[in-house]
Amino acid sequence: MGRRIAAVAAALVALGFGWVLWTLHGVFEAERQAADAAVDARRRVLDRHAAHGFERRLADGLAARRGDIERAHTDPLAPIDGLYSRVGGRVRVPAAPRAVSSPLPTTASFEALLDPRHRPAAQGPWGERLTLRGALIDAVAVDEPAQIEAAMRRFLGHRLRHVLSPEREIPSTLAVMTWFAEAADADPRLLRAALFDGFEGADGGVEGLQRSLLRHRAVFTAAEFDRLAAAALALSAHGEVPRAAFEAALDPPPPPPVPADPGAPQLIDDGRWYVAPVAADRVDGVRIDADAERAALEDEMRRGALLGPDERLLFDPRAPVPVAVHSPDWVERPARARATWRLKVALLWSCALLALAVVGLVLLDVRRRRRFVELKNDFIAAVSHELRTPLAAIRLMAETLERRVADVPRARDYPARIVREVDGLGFLVENLLSFNRIDKGRWVARRRPLALSEVIGSIRDSVEAAFERAVTWQTTGLEARVDADPALIELLVANLVRNAIQHSQGPLTLELAAEARGGRVVLRVADDGPGIPAEARRHIFEPFYRGPARTSRGSGLGLALGQRIARLHGGRLVVVRTGAEGTVFEVDLPAAPGESEAR
């Protein structure tokens, strides 16, 4: 039974300790996961903030260049570097040159118009224009500056009033301007107005030849356009007219590879361009400096305390999110969390192994102790059992000897003394055997109704025969009946009485009283001896404990045996009072059936 209890207790302790370890392991794992989650959450927040900030900066940059894109739509000389616009599927900025499929007669007209001998005739505004051309050529021939300027102003005035088709307007005007530029005192203001600034009049305005030629580029063949553009450049250089924008517009850069339907703002061409739909059929874009934008955004986030000194932004146009935050914490903090988790788990399981080792050692020690106690009890039982036979033989021979030496005065008391010592030794052996049997659960109480007077009478005879001591017996209520094993109850009361006699000197008064209390019978055993020493009171019910007094005799099992007998009957043995006036024990026993009703 004891082994089972120890095994169950060890199992419960192991389960409890295992539950604690598992709980702590879960706590440590939760801490590690929380650390990883915190790093991931900060990384997601910073990446999202960086992505939104980068997109905002790009959108703001496109919005800032929107005016330049609109000017590039209307002004062929507007700067187009780093700009893009597509409307209705056609790239408007930069405008792609388009060549006609067949040459127009304007080429021959331009070459002919440069020849002063060529004087064609025509009707309508075109004929008037040719007449004014001839007048300018005549004025140049006579080298009269006033006539030249007047003729030029009449020609330009007619151009302001009558706008011809581009294939006639542009070549004829360039030819006339070439003749005018060759004049010695040609007015540079007229050249600038005709080529670059244009004219404003009451009937409207005419743009400069540079813009007009670029705007109507699709009208001419590539070769014809090149000759006309060369003439316009020569005239611009002659009159110190701005021509850098015109030269740049003559060879526009190729447009970026914008998808047919971008759908949403995006980076293209490895992050060199940013395009965004601005209407159902229009897409605008600007060239960006991704590194500069990234650096500016990084400084902005660092000023806002979103980035640490060792954190920076990375740019990857091919990634779903083009900018991302790079921080040593993304690697170091999870690594530190994992290292801490490993250390905690290692310490935890080291404690577990140590605890298991301690439990194993304790169980081993308990097992060895129990084995030692079992061996001791077996030895005591074996020795006690073996003592019974010689003790019985010694007592028989002492009684025989007592009868035969009854007539010898000097030897008359020897047999009686031998009998008393044998009885005392026999009682000790009986205590040892009974304690061993009860402690191992081998004694099953055979209960029956029993009068306490029967028990006390048997004990009184044996005690008076065993001790040469004046003992006064006071009994009260011993007619009470209990439901108990006679042998066990006799052994219990005998131990109480013998203890009282053994631990006292001189005459002794013993009081034995029984009282029924609600289905129980309480037997009171009191003496007027010296009492139990204070240092021994805590140990009197421990097996094999003997008091510190020199007069202490016996095996130290009497009270321990009595307590076990009381428990075997569902009762208890307690010390009610002890001191210089004596000691009082009470034993609680079950009353015999009908005993409580009878009283």
Image (cartoon, rainbow, N blue to C red):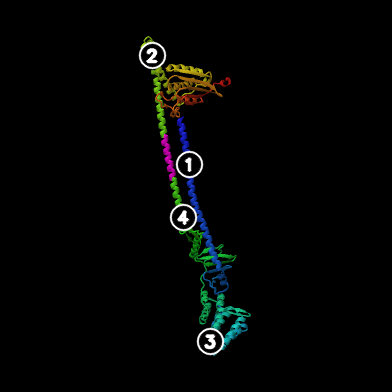
**Mark 2 against mark 3, which lies toward the viewer?**
2
Of 26 and 252, the residue lying toward us:
26
Count residues near mark 3 (Cα–Cα under 10 Å), then give few for <14, some for 14-19, many for 20+.
Answer: some
> Magenta-highlighted stretch: main secondary structure?
helix
Q: Is residue 81 magenta?
A: no
Of 128 and 587, the residue lying toward us:
587
Q: Is residue 17 visible?
A: yes
Counting residues from the start of the chain, the first of labels 4 and 3 encountered is 3
Q: Residue at x 45, y 54 (%)?
A: 331
Count residues near mark 1 (Cα–Cα under 10 Å), then give few for <14, some for 14-19, many for 20+.
Answer: few
On screen, residue 155 versus residue 561, left or right, reads right
Of 461 and 314, the residue lying toward us:
461
Q: Which mark is residue 413?
A: 2
Q: CA distance from mark 1 to mark 2?
A: 73 Å
Q: CA distance from mark 1 to mark 4?
A: 33 Å
Counting residues from the start of the chain, the first of labels 1 and 2 encountered is 1
Location of residue 320 in the rendering, given as x and y in whole percent from the top left corner: 51, 59
Instruction: Report the amino acid beneath label 4.
Output: Asp
Instruction: Report the amino acid beneath label 3.
Output: Asp
Q: CA distance from mark 4 to mark 2?
A: 102 Å
Q: Which residues are magenta?
A: 346-363
Instruction: Report the amino acid beneath label 1.
Output: Val
Q: CA distance from mark 1 to mark 3?
A: 108 Å
Instruction: Report the amino acid beneath label 2.
Output: Asp
- Circles 1 and 4 in contact, beta carbons < 8 Å: no
Q: Which residue is mark 3?
A: 185
Q: Secondary structure at mark 1?
A: helix
Q: Secondary structure at mark 2?
A: loop
Counting residues from the start of the chain, the first of labels 1 and 4 encountered is 1
Counting residues from the start of the chain, the first of labels 1 and 3 encountered is 1
Count residues near mark 2 (Cα–Cα under 10 Å), then give few for <14, some for 14-19, many for 20+.
Answer: few
Q: Residue at x 50, y 50 (%)?
A: 34
